[in-house]
Image (tube, rainbow, N blue to C red):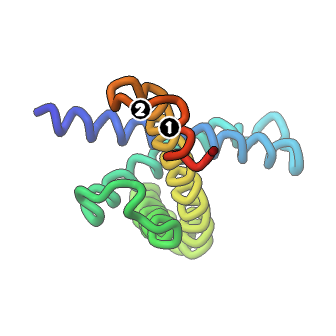
Amino acid sequence: MKKWLRRIRGAIGIGLSWAMAWFSAGMVWRVVVGFGPGDVPFPLLFGVLGFLAGTTFSGVLGVVEGRRRFDQMSVPRFAALGAIAGLLFSGTLALALNLGGGFLMLGPVVALAGGVSAAGTLALARKAEERELLAAAADHSDAGLSEDELRQLLGDG
């Protein structure tokens, strides 16, 4: 049960980070293109689509990569999985909204956004992992190393 709760929490986290990125893209779109009073507010729509695409990506990642850690994954493969998740999501969206030929326009755009978002997700995850490792290395008292030994080990001396 704990494993599933952790995966759900991870999917929500990825979905929220993608939602923030896509919301920002919607804000840029709004500033550049603008819209009238009757138009759909792009930032909110992009944010919701980003959340749904991010959770889709999390599911694809869980199925394909399984137990691999972030440091074991390459950025191109991660981006490709993001693009695949974007295509799956846009295809599902096109079917649900009965867009028909609209998938031909929506699919490549969402796939590109998914690939870029996935690469950004991996970069953020690696940065967070590095911070955790640095924080763990800062507490070197358990290892019994002196300051000089620690500097020499870490390459600063």
* Callout 1 amino acid: Leu
* Callout 2 amino acid: Leu
Relative vertical location of residue 82 with respect to residue 32 in this rendering, above or below: below
Residue 151 as seen in the image, left or right of residue 133: right
- Nearest to N terminus: mark 1 or mark 2: 2
Q: Measuring from the top left, give residue 57's x and y in whole percent.
A: 40, 55
For the point 60% across and 61% down, which residue is it?
A: 116
Q: Which residue is mark 2?
A: 145
Image quadrant occupied by the N terminus = top left
Q: Which residue is mark 1?
A: 150
On the question of residue 133 being in view, the answer is yes
Image quadrant occupied by the C terminus = top right
Residue 119 as seen in the image, left or right of residue 141: right
CA distance separating discs 1 and 2:
6 Å
On the question of residue 95 being in view, the answer is no
Q: Give neighbour class at mark 2: few <14, some 14-19, many 20+ (Cα, 10 Å).
A: few
Relative vertical location of residue 34 with respect to residue 89 in this rendering, above or below: above
Asked whether the beta carbons under mark 1 and mark 2 sit within 8 Å of each other, the answer is yes
